[in-house]
Image (spheres, rainbow, N blue to C red):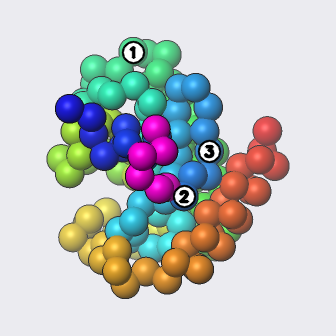
Amino acid sequence: MSTVFSKIIAGEIPGRFVYRDETVVAFLTIEPIAYGHTLVVPVEEVDKWTDLSPEVWAHLNDVAQKVGQAVLEVCGSERAGYLIAGFEVPHTHIHVFPANDMSGYNLANVMAADTTDPAKMDEVAEALRQAIAKQA
């Protein structure tokens, strides 16, 4: 059975992509800690990050670092948070988010999907895309 992330990657479910190549995608989560909260996901459906090939793991982290740099630029936070949990969706993913303190590391603090401003989500996604493209 395909994960929700595989369905987003395939275009079966809409997603606000900020990066995409053949191996890795990055898109905004619908339940963010803060605007700019991005999930960096391998295209290959692998549940645990420890089961990824070294090549995919390295590329996933390269992309996560680019997303993190873009988050710092676009969101103006002190840091870009990085978190791997993996319990909510059985498909490896790295959470990259604006962080000014440790509260972002508690995923119980996310905004509900129906409380986010779609226009703000679109605006942040576009700004992140542009910031990532400048790094190339």
Circle 3 SS class: strand
Return the residue nearer the eye: 9 or 54: 9
Q: Amino acid at mark 1?
A: Ser
Instruction: Kindly report which numbered mark, 1 or 2, lies closer to the viewer in this rendering.
Output: 2
How dense is the environment of label 1, judged by Cα within 10 Å: few (below 14), some, or many (20 and up)?
A: few
Numbered label attached to residue 53: 1
Q: Please tell me whether the stretch drawn in magenta is mainly helix, strand or loop.
A: loop
Return the residue nearer the eye: 32 or 64: 32
Q: Amino acid at mark 3?
A: Tyr
Q: Which residues are magenta?
A: 10-15
Numbered label attached to residue 16: 2
In this rendering, would 63 be left or right of 42? right
Residue at point 43%, 80% (across, down) = 116
Dot 1 or dot 2: first in sequence order is 2
Instruction: Kindly report which numbered mark, 3 or 2, lies closer to the viewer in this rendering.
Output: 2
Q: Calculate the distance from the C-alpha at mark 1 to the C-alpha at mark 3.
A: 20 Å
Q: Quadrant of the C terminus?
A: top right
